[in-house]
Image (spheres, helix red, strand yellow):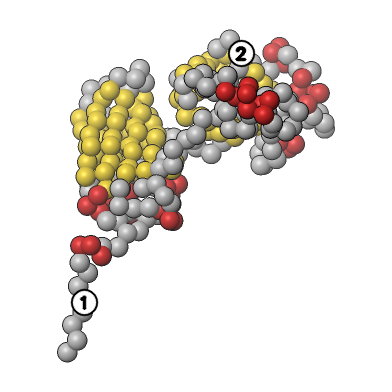
Amino acid sequence: MMGIPMMSEAQEFTSSVDCNLHGLVCNICSQPDFINIYHPGPYLTWPPSTNVLEWEFTDAQGNLMHEATLVDESTVSFSFDIPITDTMFVSVLHTNDSVFHNGSEYSWACLVEDYLVWEVTEGPLGPSGSWTLSGGSVGVDVSEPVEPECNLQYDGDGDGVVTVVDVLGLLGEFGQACEEVSYTIEGRWLWSPSENVEDANTMYEFADGLQYTFYCVTAECDEAYWNSLDTSEAIPNPDTYSFDGDTLTIDEFPQIVTFDCDGGVLHFSNGGKLWRLGSDCP
């Protein structure tokens, strides 16, 4: 009888699921001073023996609450002592040096960032609270190194052609550090119920720590209309806000944001999107 061939260790297969399908799950989150969180990476990425999860938890002030490096383990748990009015930020880097997803030349590296807030809900036995993942928990592929956004195509004289004159100018740039790109939240932003900015019916203005909200009350919600408004025409009681790094906090509710289209589009980790007024971004 022909036996079933055994797979040697050298023949162990590899598999992986797209990074943006990896997200965190709260296993035990109903205790105000203890938490247990599940990451599907070690289940979805093979071989499991080389799955590494690097966890880090911080409070709203950036203080380290817990960190751990786990091999072939899907959950992390720890006790803590922060008020339930605080926010917990979680970051977990999942790497696997044996996996090259979809033929990539770089080994697997997937970063998930999220935050947890204490939420109270009404149930049949009365109110109950739990730590809730509120940032979307979407993985980002960080396996490929990020290239700097300068000195890629050097047309120094701006004539549309790279010539020896441009090369000589480029030589003078060697040793210069690339400027870090940063964008401001200050200004006016449009929100649309669809994926088309032309359907925008709401505008938010961020200025001096206050977020003002405006609604379109005319048939023509064009740029001229939005520009004609001033803060006296916003709805009453503007919200307070702060912006630090990639965290936009509105009325003490933090949200992770990223910019696109040279700062013309603002993406929220929960899927929301704003367009900067006056930009040509799609």
User: What is the crowding at mark 2: few (fewer than 14 residues within 10 Å), some, or many (at least 20)?
Assistant: some
Q: Furthest residue to the bottom? A: 1
Query: Label 1, on which residue?
Result: 5
User: How far from the left and from the top, in percent, is residue 75?
Assistant: 25, 43
Residue 76, quarter of the rendered image = top left
Vertical relation: 134 (above or below) 38: above
59 relative position to 182: left or right: left
**Marks 1 and 2, Cα distance to the nearest angstrom?**
69 Å
Q: Secondary structure at mark 1?
A: loop
Amino acid type of the residue tagged 2 in the rendering: Ala
Residue pictured at 60% horizontal, 24% vertical: 170
For the C terminus, give its image quadrant.
top right
150 relative position to 256: left or right: right
Residue pictured at 30% horizontal, 56% vertical: 46
Residue 205 visible within the image: no
Query: Label 2, on which residue?
Result: 207
User: How far from the left and from the top, in percent, is residue 51?
Assistant: 27, 48
Q: Secondary structure at mark 2?
A: strand
Vertical relation: 134 (above or below) 42: above
Residue 225 visible within the image: yes
* Of labels 1 and 2, the one closer to you: 1
